[in-house]
Image (tube, rainbow, N blue to C red):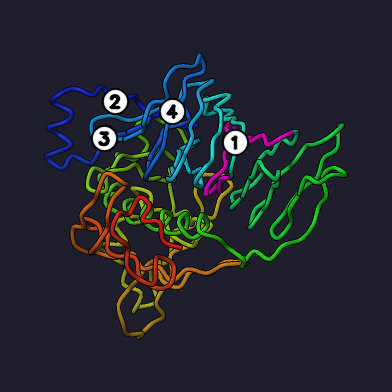
Amino acid sequence: MRLSRPILYTAAAALALAGGALAQNAISAKAGMVNVADGDVFLLDAKGGEPRRVEPKITEFIEIKEGQTLKTGEGRAEVLLVPGSFLRMAEETSFRLVSNKLSDARLEMLTGGGLLEVSETMEDSKVTIVTRDATVSVAKAGLYRIDSDPARVRVYMGEALVSYGNGQSAVLKGGKELVAGSNGWVTARFDPKETDALYRWAKRRSGYIAMANVSAARQATPNSNGLRSGFWQWNPYFGFATFIPFGGTMRSPFGYYYYSPYTVMDVYFPPNYGYGGGGGYGGNNGSSGFASSMPQRSAGSSGSYSPSAGISSASMSAGSSVGAGSTGSRSSGGGSVSGGSTGGGAVSGGAVSGGSAPAGGGGGRRN
C-alpha cells in the first residue's frame, strides 16, 4: 500500500501549480477525496449543520471525513478511494463514509447509485460498499454498479463477494446482479451492454483520467517512498488527480491505459519494432488489475504508433488513442479537454463522446 504525502497548501504551492509544476502527490494517506464535483454537490457533517457546497479548487482538495455524507442533487461527483479505484456518483445520490483508511475503505450507499471503477487491487487494501443489508467486497479489478433504492449490485466485469440477509452470500462475476425484492435478494443475469447516462459519463471520465496520466506519469518520481503500489498524482493542467501505477502499464475496465513512470516514455519515444526487437511492458507489481502489454507493431508495418488504440474487453470496447498532443483547457467542473492534454494527446474513437472531449470535462451532462 502506497501512502502519499499530504500537501501543504501555501501561497508558494499555489504559485508552483500556476507555474505548471506537476510532480506533486495530491492525496494524503486517506480515502475519500472529491476529484470532480459537477453541478450541485454537497458535504454534510456527521454532527448536522448546514450542508457545504463542494467546489474543488486548484489550491484546495476536499476530503470526506469519516462519518460525513457526500450528496449530489442536479449534479455528479467523482471520489477517489484507494489508488486505482474511483466511485462516480449519479444525480440524487448520497453515501456516508464509514472508513477512510486505505487498508479498508468502506462506505454506505444511502440514496441513488454509483459506479465503481477498479483498475488495480492490492492485498493490503480493499474497498467495501454497503447498500441496505448487503455488504459488497471487491475481489478483483473491474466495474461495479451499486444502487440503494431499489437495492441492487451489478458486476459489469470483475468479481465481488456479497454478504446479505441472514448470513447468505454470493459471488458475482461479469453479467451477474443481485437485486433486493419483496421476497429478499435474488441473483439474476443482465446485459452489460445496456448502459445509462452515469455509465457513459464514467466512461468519459476514465478517458480524461488516462489523458492526464500521461503528462503526470512523465513528471512523477518512481518509487518515491519505497512502497510497491500505485498512487494518485495531481495534474494542474487538467484540474484533477490521475492514477499512476507503481510499475508497468495498467488498463482500466473501459480500455484506457494508465502508464507508470517507467513505461510512459514509450508514448513519447516508442520503441523501434521494425527490426524484431523491443516489446511491451506488462504486469505491474504482483497486484491484481488490468495489466496489459503495450500494443506492438509488426516488422515492416506502416502507420503511426498509438499505444492505447483499439482496446477491447469482454463486454465493452474503447477506441481511445493517447499520444503526444497539445494543451487543452479546463473548467472548474473537472477539466474541459478540447484538444488533448499537455503531452497527453486526445482521446478519439467511440469511447469518449464520439471522439471528442465535451466542454466541461468533469461532467457535461450528456447521455
Q: CA distance from mark 4 to mark 3?
A: 15 Å
Distance (Cα) linking label 1 and label 2? 24 Å
Q: Earlier in the sequence, mark 1 or mark 4?
A: 4
Q: Are marks 1 and 4 in contact (CB under 8 Å)?
A: no
* Residue bearing mark 1: 127
Q: Are marks 2 and 4 in contact (CB under 8 Å)?
A: no
Residue at x 70% of width, y 47% of height: 152
Q: Position of residue 352 (x, y in %)?
A: 40, 65
Instruction: State which tag comes first along the sequence, 1 or 3.
Output: 3
Label 1 crowd (10 A; few <14 / some 14-19 / many >=20): many
Query: Most prominent secondary structure in the magenta stretch?
Result: strand
Location of residue 138 by image quarter: top right
Q: 10 Å neighbourhood of mark 4: few (<14), some, or many (≥20)?
A: many
Q: Nearer the viewer, mark 2 or mark 4?
A: 4
Q: Label 2 is placed on what type of residue?
A: Ile
Q: State the extent of the magenta-drawn residues as a range.
A: 113-132
